[in-house]
Structure formats: structure tokens, C-alpha cells
Image: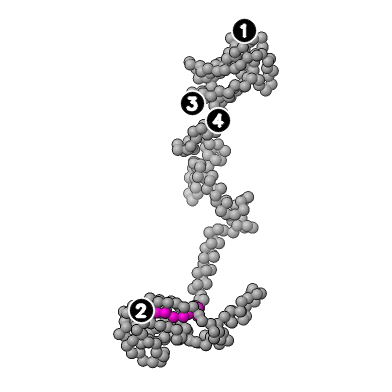
Amino acid sequence: MIGDTSLYPVNIDSFFNVYNEDYTGYSIPDERKTISGDNYQVVLNHLAKQNSIAISGYTEVLPAATLNQGEFKVTDYVIPAVTRTGIDYYIGQTLQFHSTAAGNEIKISYTSPGDKINSTLLNKNIDAIYNIEKILGTIGTGKNLDIGAYSNLALWLTYFFSVFQTHTHSGASNTGFTRQLDGGAIKAGSIVNSLISASAAIAQSKLQKGILDSGIAFIPVGTDKYVDIQSSAWATSNHIVTLTRGAYGYTDPGTTGSLSFIELVAQDGFRVNFFSDTSSLATVIPFVWILR
């Protein structure tokens, strides 16, 4: 009996006091059934209280009565085994009809006190819990599924998806495993052109406008006042050059003037000119160049 011998939990509902002489039950209207052509029966979806069943065109008779046309009886009325519940009515579920009713479709209205909880329902719940545990693994002490710094499995899966959605995994394929990462993928910490989708939105991004080449150079002494810079990245660059006077480890003489560049027609690179009122430089002018 629930609530009678159970030791857990400490505080429990007294379910055996729910049913009493005044309990009205739950009304179920117009449940559709078809009377069987084999045994002239229907089985209700729920247990029914005695004297609560109503079927248009049919009259209920006692379980021991012989059925006539237009009559039905409940064949499995029982009294609950534990009488201390206070239930003072029979409950049943199987309705028997006269043979002339075979194949008829009927609507049944009745009052149910509630259904039994059986082992099938409990086993389904147990199976569901077991399957959840089996899929997720033991997250915690066992570390069968280690989610590291992420507080829950959903956050870890979000991170995992974002990383692997944006990278191509190359390398040898092992039986039973996914393709391994090699030097051209995440393992090496690098992204090369072959790993970037052709449809990637790179235009005007930091990838497109990033530094392609850079270095330190000098405007020489004398009257030329220019220096040629060659770079293999020039042909595929945006032809954007940033020039900054001065360089780490070198002293700028402070000569008044400005730097500018033009493309070298016959070579992959550009020429940096120094414009000033001074016709000849007595000291080199160091500068840093950045090609984008």
C-alpha cells in the first residue's frame, strides 16, 4: 500500500485517503468504440465506476444477467482489494453486448476513478532513464565524457561544432575513427588557402587586408634619394604600402622631407622616394615599410 510501508521519502502524501465515498472521479464523455464481431465486447480506455456508464440505445444489466438485444453488462467489475480506501463502488473496464450488436459503433460516457499503475509503465520509465545515461555517459568523476572548462554538455557541443564546422580535416583515415588532423589543419595551428572555402566572406576583412610582407629599409646618402623594395607578395597584394620614418635600432637624422612610393614596372615591388629641399643627403634615413 502506498504510504503504508514505504520508508522513503520521509514526508509522503497519504494516497489511501484520496478515495472515499464522496470522491466524484473524472468524467470521460463520448469515447468511441466498435463492438467486436467475435466476442461482442469492447474494452474501455480507463476503469469505470459502477452505475456511471451511459450508452445511447443500450441499458446496463447486472453482471449475472442473461443479455438481450439492446443490453450490456460489465464482466470484470471488482472491489479494490484494500478496503481501507473507503471506495464503495465496483470498477470495471470490459463491456459485453448481445450478439445482435456485433460491429456497431457506439459512444460511451462514464466516470473513472483513475487507472492502475502497472509494471509496463514503470519499465518504460526505467528504460528511458537508462538510455539517457548510456548516451550521455558519466560526466563527472568517471570522466567518460570530459567537457573541460565548459559548465554543461550543451556549451561544450556548441564549441565543438563551431570549431569543426569551419575546418577541413585532412590526413590518413583509420578504421573506426574520423580523419586525423595533420600539419595542414588545426593540429599545426595554421590555416592555409586549401582550408578556406571558396564561398568564405573574406572581402574587406582582416584576412584580405592583413600584412603580406614588411621590412626595414634606408634612403641612401647622396642625390638619388630613393630605394627600390622588391617583394614576391606585390603581384597578389592590394598595392597598399604603409611607410613610417625611423626603425628600431637606427637613428633618424631628422632631415625635413616626406616618403612616398610608386610601382616598379619591371619588377615585383615598389620604389620609395624621399622628397625634400635638400639636394643631397649626408646621412641615411631609416624607415619601416608594410605591404598589404
Mark 4 near mark 2, Cβ–Cβ under 8 Å?
A: no
Choose between 126 and 239: the one closer to the eye: 239
SS of the residue under disc 1: loop
- Which of marks 1 and 2 precedes in the sequence? 2
Q: Secondary structure at mark 4?
A: loop
Q: Which mark is residue 106?
A: 2
Residue 22 vs 273, above or below: the answer is below
Disc marking residue 279: 1
Is residue 266 magenta-colored? no
Residue 262 lies, with reference to residue 97, above or below; the image says: above
Q: Earlier in the sequence, mark 3 or mark 4?
A: 4
Dot 1 or dot 4, earlier in sequence? 4
Of badges 4 and 2, the one in the foreground is 2
Provide residue 7's location: percent of width, then percent of height: 64, 76
Q: Which residue is mark 4?
A: 210
Q: Local crowd at mark 3 within 10 Å, few (<14), some, or many (≥20)?
A: few
Q: CA distance from mark 1 to mark 4?
A: 36 Å
Span colored in magenta: 107-115
Query: How many marks on residues?
Result: 4
